[in-house]
Image (spheres, rainbow, N blue to C red):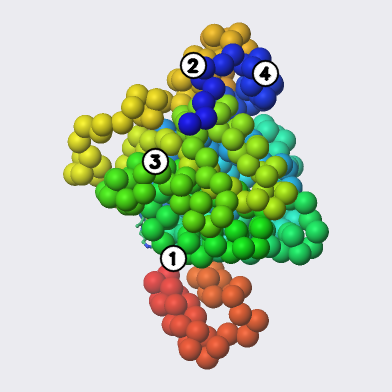
Amino acid sequence: MHRVIGERSLAETSVDPDLARSLLRDIVRARVFDHRAVALQRRGWMSGYPPFEGQEGSQVGAAHALADDDWLFPTYRSNAMQLARGRPPADILRFRRGLSGFEPDGPTGDSTAENRETGRSGTTFTAATPIATQLPHAVGAGMAATHLDADHAVCAYLGDGATSEGDFHEAMNFAGVFSAPVVFFCENNHWAISLPEERQTRSETIAQKASAYGFDGLRVDGNDPLAVYEVVAESRERACAGDPVLVESLTYRQGAHSTSDDPDRYRGEVDLPEWRTADPLERTAAYLREEGVVDDGFVESTRERANAELDEAVAAAESTPESDPGEAFDYAYATLPPRVAAQRRAVVDRERTRE
Ligand SMILES: Cc1ncc(C[n+]2csc(CCOP(=O)(O)OP(=O)(O)O)c2C)c(N)n1
């Protein structure tokens, strides 16, 4: 188990003070985003939202370990990772509202201009909602990078539940056989909706599943962003050299699976070690204060700025016009097959009669 907090001083890590402050700043930004998004959903602003509270340290640590031209394949849960990679918060809010103002960064995507806070960029694909479907796509993108002699890595994000899907195993197998430059970043947050990890798999760890495909699996304390940064940074180097890696980041979903879930129905006392359920924001802030790289006011002033950033993002998402319902059909085919064309007409007509 890889760890920094409680074991090493900052000077003994590969994280310099500027990066350490960026990690904490992005954790705070993510927390503020998550709280605001839940509040917006509660007043009907969007139909549903999957909170990630408790997973910010893991996601932000991983995001910062990627190079600017690496590609990220996220899911509905990994918004902290997307924000830390430079996706503007307004884009994520539009996506949650089903608005087409959302601009996925294409292969040449660059959100730097809008990303005043971090100045980071990179290609970040649209978040996948079907479980594990992003994984074969990510491996395909990695194989394409090898084919094109591009030297970027691909990070495929997944949850523990995704490891039970066929897509996971197919993607892992292809990554191994084709030496694809892929880091599988699995956040084991203990739950797949109501199913705890011990009922997800009989394997002792998720990391060990990598050995069946001929590459390494590593475990990291996911509530320690510095440790996650180190493990993912090393893994991406290995991936670029033709050795994919599966990283299992052990963290904890503090809240509900989504705003339509009530975890009290299935979650009693959980018997997990304290580090596993620790709050990454408080833990990282305490460590960095002790190390003398942030002062007492750092979290509060970052929170204020993040709130202002979100006010702007909400206003931008609110001023985005409603999507054209027909657009949902527009980008998969050059020419719509007749059955799909009929479905498109039916949807557009139905929406028109609603107006
Ligand atoms: C293919 C597919 N099957 C089922 C679902 C319903 N579903 C949504 S989230 C979820 C649990 C996923 O758990 P995990 O992979 O651990 O990710 P987490 O939600 O914890 O981030 C399921 C089964 C889905 N979205 N897609």
In screen coordinates, is 341 left or right of 200? Answer: right
Dot in front, 4 or 1: 1
Cα distance, mark 4 to mark 2?
Answer: 17 Å
Cα distance, mark 3 to mark 2?
Answer: 21 Å
- Please state which amino acid type lies under the numbered disc 2: Gly
Tag 4, which secondary structure? helix
Which label sits on residue 6?
Answer: 2
Q: Where 316 falls versus 126 (above or below)?
A: above
Tag 1, which secondary structure? helix
Mark found first going from the N terminus, 4 or 2: 2
Residue that mark 1 sits on: 166
Cα distance, mark 4 to mark 1?
Answer: 42 Å
Q: Quadrant of the C terminus?
A: bottom left
Mark found first going from the N terminus, 3 or 2: 2
Q: Is residue 226 visible?
A: yes
Cα distance, mark 1 to mark 3?
Answer: 20 Å
Residue that mark 4 sits on: 17
Quarter-of-image position of residue 103: bottom right
Residue that mark 3 sits on: 189
- Mark 4 Cβ inside 8 Å of ligand 1: no
Mark found first going from the N terminus, 4 or 1: 4
Residues at circles 1 and 3 in contact by the CB criterion of under 8 Å: no
Residue 69 pos. (x, y %)? 74, 47
Seen as rendered, the residue at the extreme right is 149
Mark found first going from the N terminus, 3 or 4: 4
Dot in front, 3 or 2: 2
Q: Nearer the viewer, residue 76 or 344?
A: 76
In screen coordinates, is 47 left or right of 115? Answer: left
Q: Is residue 320 visible?
A: no
- Mark 3 Cβ inside 8 Å of ligand 1: yes
